[in-house]
Image (cartoon, rainbow, N blue to C red):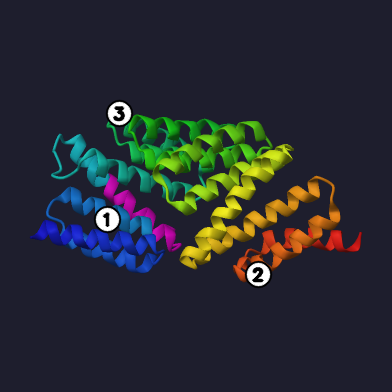
Amino acid sequence: MQATEYQAEWERARGAMQQRDYGAARDGFARAVDLAGELGEALSARSMVARMDTLLGELERARRRIDQIEAEVFAADAAGEAIPGLSPEVRARIRQVAAIVTREEGDRVAATEAFIALYDYCLEHELFTQAIDAAHHVAIAGDLDQQLVWAKRGIEAAERGEERGWLAALWNNLGVTYEDAGRFDEALEAYTKARAYHYETGGPLQKLIADWAIGRTHRLGGDLDQARVWLGTALDAAVGLRAETNGDAALEWVAYARHELGLVTLAAGDRAAALSELEAAREVWSEAGLESWAEGTAEFDAVLAELRTN
């Protein structure tokens, strides 16, 4: 009964974390500590309390918690004493939280080294999802070369673990990294692989976003004919999904697709048509609530202002 209560509390806390209610999540993981049937379970929940502390900005408390957990594990290991329930998965969770705390304290070099060691540990124990996460943490802390290397290592871990649901996001993230670097041919290759996994594992929204990404990358790379084809397909799908579901997410992608198509027309040199298309897209942009994205809206409005005055 106790184990069932622990698992139920853990899931509630994890759900609160996914909803970004970190205070409720911390309280839930703290309750899970008291419900743990084995010491390993308690250590796992305690590490997640420390993780919530980092998300709540309480780094000193997080550091004290994770240091105490690591000291207990080290003492048991040094004495040759097995801790019941201290599985490789729990050890990986403790190490992950310790590395996150180190990163949030500002020591990115030490944090990166810890995440690299964690990645190797997770692969050794076939904890593929955790290895993917460790690779992600290395990527976000590193320079461009590290981002590319570790994005690919995350993909390698997902392929080894046959984590097909992860592969769409991982290839997409690699595409974003290449796109940000201006390496559009490589971005297109990555987005194309992401699209294949989105079409295998995703729903209608994920599929049209994958098509949109390919169309946008064609525009950035200068292939306007292909851009128009892919973006037109994405727009048709978004309009159809909006009509079917009346969902805000679908309307958002109607706006994004129409915006991109207007930029294709502008790149083709037809300024009058581009102004008409972009003004229509701007109305949908507002309807979809995208004005809350200040940077993107400012860039959109700057293009419109330039077209209106010239």
Mark 1: which amino acid?
Arg
Q: Along the polypeptide, which appears first: circle 2 or circle 3? A: 3
Task: Give the alpha-carbon distance from disc 3 to disc 1, as whole Å.
Answer: 25 Å
Q: Quadrant of the N terminus?
A: bottom left
Mark carried by residue 124 = 3
Q: Which residue is mark 1?
A: 46
Q: Position of residue 166 (x, y in %)?
A: 40, 42
The reply, left or right, for residue 299 in relation to residue 240 is right
Q: In the image, is residue 59 part of the stretch drawn in magenta?
A: yes
Place residue 48 in its image quadrant.
bottom left
Circle 1 SS class: helix
Q: Quadrant of residue 25?
A: bottom left
**Residue displayed at 17% across by 59% down:** 6
In-front residue for pair 186/68: 186
Category of crowding for the residue at label 3, using alpha-carbon neighbours closer than 10 angstroms: few (below 14), some (14–19), many (at least 20): few
Q: From the viewer's perspective, is the residue at label 3 or at label 1 nearer?
A: 3
* Residue 176 position by quadrant: top right
**In the image, residue 39 lies at what x, y percent?**
16, 50
Give, as a single range, the part of the protein colored magenta. 53-70
**Which residue is located at x 52 percent, y 65 percent?**
243
Q: How far apart in space, not on screen, are marks 2 and 3 (Cα)?
A: 50 Å
Given this view, does label 1 or label 2 mark the residue nearer the observer? 2
Residue that carries the numbered disc 2 in the rendered image: 286
Q: Amino acid at mark 3?
A: Glu
The residue positioned 49% from the left and 66% from the top of the image is 247
Is residue 61 in view?
no
- Residue at the farthest right position: 310
